[in-house]
Amino acid sequence: MNRVIVTVVGKDTVGIIAAVCTYMADKGINILDISQTIVQEYFNMMMITDIKSCTVPFDVMSSDLQKLGESIGVQVKCQREDIFDKMHRI
Amino acid sequence: MININEVLETNKMIEQENLDVRTITMGISLLDCATGDLRQTCDNIYSKITSLAKHLVKTGDDISQEFGIPVVNKRISITPAAIIGSSCCKSSKDFVEIAKTLDKVACDVGVNFIGGFSAIVSKGMTPSDEFLIRSIPEAMACTGRLCSSVNVGSTKTGINMDAVRLMGDVILETAELTKEHDSLGCAKLVVLCNAPDDNPFMAGAFHGVSEADAIINVGVSGPGVVKYVMEHLPEHTDFEVLCETIKKTAFKITRVGQLVAQEASRRLNVPFGIIDLSLAPTPAIGDSVADILKCIGLEQAGAPGTTAALALLNDQVKKGGVMASSYVGGLSGAFIPVSEDQGMIDAVCAGALTIEKLEAMTCVCSVGLDMIAVPGDTKATTISGIIADESAIGMVNQKTTAVRIIPVIGKNVGDVVEFGGLLGHAPIMPVNTFDCSVFVNRKGRIPAPIHSFKN
């Protein structure tokens, strides 16, 4: 229930992971897994995070990360893990 | 653990293929609101709906944000109003007051449609049913969010031809009273046979008397997703692989609906009713059932083979969807509305698709002749004849069928009408003008058909 999938999509540039991770460390969000891939020259990253100890509510975290993404030219999206679990696991 | 490809696949469905949850519809019983006094009944209706549904829109929006899936519509369905008004409404004017109350409460709680200004008259009409039906034109003209439906037949009872005849007149009058807006009132009015009690989709949604006090029903969507996977199959893929692919895709789409329904149910503290498995198109490019038919191998929807392709699609969607949800109900099938599906509009404009072909298609899918614009000078008896045909298909095949036909006053074949938003736009379709008035004007009802003496 506390797991949130954070996806980052955009043009590859220096410091994307650093910027996102810094925010997460600051807000007490624990990163459980990171994977990334390049699809058609676009940087795709997925983080599985645990927000149990997160110091801000979900909607604040979501909009903060979205704004952070915009400032470095990437799209950041936060979604509860359940939607992926439901769709891809029986 | 979820991997990146699964995450990207889901998000691609949402961002590029128009995957969404089409509607969270809260069904609310108004049986306990009925009194002998009109004002009191209206007050009871307003306060019951407000108390149950005040958080519906916000809850839908919260779920949408947290899971990253659009929840397009939040709606309400109510007990058929003809039952609620049976003690206090002494005329059609009284039912218009109930209509206004429902419209106001829909505005105040922020839902975009409220359904259930309805009468169930599959065997006969009470005076209250008839008052309600006769009030529909004015009710549609003076409200914005109200949807109306009339169930005129069922497999068990046959077809109430008196109601069918009356609905021909009511549809024309509704068109006339809303002619300033291209007869938009008729887009929110549907005539059904075998109407389900738990349909979350408008305009036919109502909360049947077999239902609990309040319930959450969810309609999923996703023609765009099915179309995308069809497009990416190798050429000449055989039927086995084709069907399996549709089934798996329908499963994934429905699982999202199930998740949203359970979340909405939990957060609103209202029991989960059903998921409606319908593939519901929108006017957005690519979000089209007709486009799926084209991907299966037809030049246009309406070409020979269309009915078979649609039967295949409809069945596979159900097979995938049933496994994905704990309770399935409502209409559950592919929708083929004309104005709400760009591929269908194109097919009509190209001359590939006629009302007669659409009628054949309704034998194998939900729900019926849907959002069809016809010339404004179409006779009431012709509309009744079309309703009778469609009802007969539903009655004999033990399925829901419906007619949502819009005689657009002042327009003729060759014109196009614009309804706006999800209702889309439609070319005026020609209607068979040979007379059926002697048939339609016969009194009484068509008896129920025999089904191998099941009882």
Image (tube, rainbow, N blue to C red):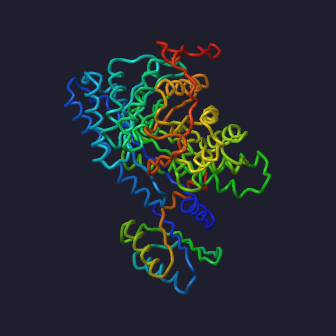
Residue in the image at 76% along x and 45% along y:
B239
State whether residue A15 is above or below residue B359: below
State whether residue B103 is above or below residue B252: above
> Which of the two residues, B371 or B145, is positioned nearer the viewer here?
B371
Q: For the view shown, which residue lies furthest in the bottom direction?
A: A14
Going by the image, does B322 lie left or right of B200? Answer: right
User: Which x, y percent locates residue A76?
Assistant: 49, 72
> Which of the two residues, B321 or A88, is positioned nearer the viewer here?
B321
Q: Is residue B326 visible?
A: no
State whether residue A17 is above or below residue B30: below
Going by the image, does B243 lie left or right of B71? Answer: right
Q: Quadrant of the C terminus of chain B?
A: top right
Residue in the image at 59% along x and 77% along y:
A43
> Which of the two residues, B30 or B180, is positioned nearer the viewer here?
B180
User: Which x, y percent locates residue B259?
Assistant: 50, 51
User: Which x, y percent locates residue B294?
Assistant: 68, 49
Q: How many marks?
A: 0
State whether residue A41 is above or below residue B134: below
Q: Is residue A46 visible?
A: yes
Residue in the image at 47% along x and 12% along y:
B444
Among the 4 quarters of the image, the one containing residue B359: top right
Q: Quadrant of the N terminus of chain B?
A: bottom right
User: Which x, y percent locates residue B295?
Assistant: 69, 51
Residue in the image at 44% along x and 73% along y:
A66
